[in-house]
């Protein structure tokens, strides 16, 4: 990949455009793939496909749970979404089936666990404090793109976390560069004609200052139940729907690091009475969990005490002083 830059002034840079021939390949995996192979592919191209990640009968049930919310959506003001795009935000709280079978998908969660978990240690006086911060949900949104929609501008979802990546030729040997991973499941066929997500392979290696090049974008065409997984630092966007009669239906979410603010405020977006009905592991995935050592506490305790007061003073949510465990 060409990474040469020309500096014009101290603050303004002109980038030599990337050539299409230098873009990395986009791989396709089976749903039971080894997470290590998926991670390798994400580091190289920033995105990959996963075949048949979700059963069709699950998709149908998710669509049934979400359809009234899709119909109720109002037009976005501004040019980030075309008027033909309808969204269901806070999707995890509106479709329990989606929460369990799409967001909590084993391959996606295994990749996120490896990529987005932060392990660290600190001195507390002469004692070492060890801390593990698990990934958490960043947002969950269903996107329905109707006929006539235009291209959404190419953008990076990592922007909400104020990232400022330098340009690199190869992915670093650690996970410090990225803050999020997206998971887009096709509810209906997603094609070049009807608005499949397009993305620029390799753009996760670019500088924050390098603008997107539309001609480099490839469409993540998917059959219903297929998934597209992507680092949030990749340029991407929903695409124009040039058909007259097809809906492009996508169930999407991003996970992020446990110590970052969530893009979609999960504590306010999902009503408490809905959260109370969720299984504990879904509550935790949404952020009702301590990010060790001390991020997100309520009354010095695990935040789940607000959902279940019987947990008060349960030490399991506290930092880990046992060095041998790490
Ligand atoms: O609809 C899509 O394919 C992607 C939407 C998206 O990237 C966004 O809204 O941030
Ligand atoms: Fe996006």
Image (cartoon, helix red, strand yellow):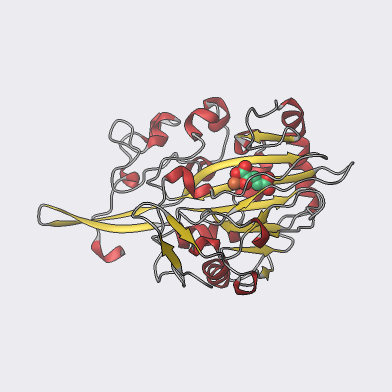
Instruction: Give the side of residue 58 with respect to residue 295, left or right.
Output: right
Instruction: Give the side of residue 158 with respect to residue 78, left or right.
Output: left
Q: Where in the figure is residue 33, as x and y percent of width and height?
A: 63, 70
Q: Where in the figure is residue 242, as x and y percent of width and height?
A: 83, 46
Q: Nearer the viewer, residue 203 or 252?
A: 203
Q: Where in the figure is residue 76, as x and y percent of width and height?
A: 66, 29
Question: How many numbered marks, from 0 up?
Answer: 0
Q: Quadrant of residue 34?
A: bottom right
Task: Name the residue rendered at 64%, 72% in the picture.
Answer: 25
Residue 69 seen anywhere in this rendered image of the structure: yes
Q: Residue furthest left?
A: 126
Instruction: Give the side of residue 34 with respect to residue 129, left or right.
Output: right
Task: Name the residue rendered at 10%, 52% in the picture.
Answer: 125
The answer to whether residue 112 is above or below residue 158 is: below
Q: Quadrant of residue 68?
A: top right
Q: Quadrant of the C terminus?
A: bottom left
Q: Quadrant of residue 87?
A: top right
The answer to whether residue 133 is above or below residue 97 is: below
Q: Where in the figure is residue 215, as x and y percent of width and height?
A: 67, 60
Residue 252 seen anywhere in this rendered image of the structure: no
Task: Name the residue rendered at 33%, 55% in the picture.
Answer: 10
């Amino acid at each position: 990949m060409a990474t040469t830059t020309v500096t014009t002034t101290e603050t303004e840079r002109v980038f030599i455009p990337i050539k299409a021939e230098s873009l990395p390949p986009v791989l396709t995996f089976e749903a039971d793939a080894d997470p290590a192979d998926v991670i390798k592919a994400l580091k190289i191209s920033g995105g990959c496909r996963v075949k048949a990640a979700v059963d069709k009968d699950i998709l149908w049930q998710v669509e049934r749970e979400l359809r009234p919310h899709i119909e109720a959506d109002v037009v976005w003001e501004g040019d980030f979404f075309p008027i033909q795009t309808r969204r269901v935000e806070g999707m995890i709280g509106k479709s329990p089936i989606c929460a369990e079978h799409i967001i909590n998908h084993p391959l996606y969660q295994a990749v996120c666990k490896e990529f987005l978990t932060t392990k660290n240690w600190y001195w507390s006086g002469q004692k070492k404090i060890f801390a593990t911060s698990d990934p958490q949900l960043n947002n969950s949104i269903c996107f329905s793109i109707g006929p006539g929609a235009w291209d959404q501008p190419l953008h990076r979802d990592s922007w909400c976390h104020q990232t400022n990546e330098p340009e690199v030729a190869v992915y670093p040997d650690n996970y410090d560069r990225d803050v999020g991973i997206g998971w887009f499941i096709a509810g209906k066929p997603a094609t070049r004609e009807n608005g499949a997500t397009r993305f620029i392979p390799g753009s996760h290696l670019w500088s924050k200052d390098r603008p997107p090049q539309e001609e480099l974008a490839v469409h993540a065409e998917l059959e219903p139940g297929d998934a597209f997984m992507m680092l949030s630092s990749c340029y991407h966007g929903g695409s124009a729907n040039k058909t007259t009669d097809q809906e492009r239906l996508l169930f999407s979410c991003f996970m992020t690091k446990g110590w970052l603010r969530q893009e979609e405020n999960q504590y306010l977006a999902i009503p408490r009475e809905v959260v109370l009905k969720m299984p504990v592991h879904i509550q935790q995935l949404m952020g009702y969990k301590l990010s060790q050592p001390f991020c997100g506490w309520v009354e010095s305790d695990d935040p789940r005490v607000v959902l279940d007061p019987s947990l008060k003073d349960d030490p399991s949510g506290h930092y880990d002083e046992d060095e041998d465990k790490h």
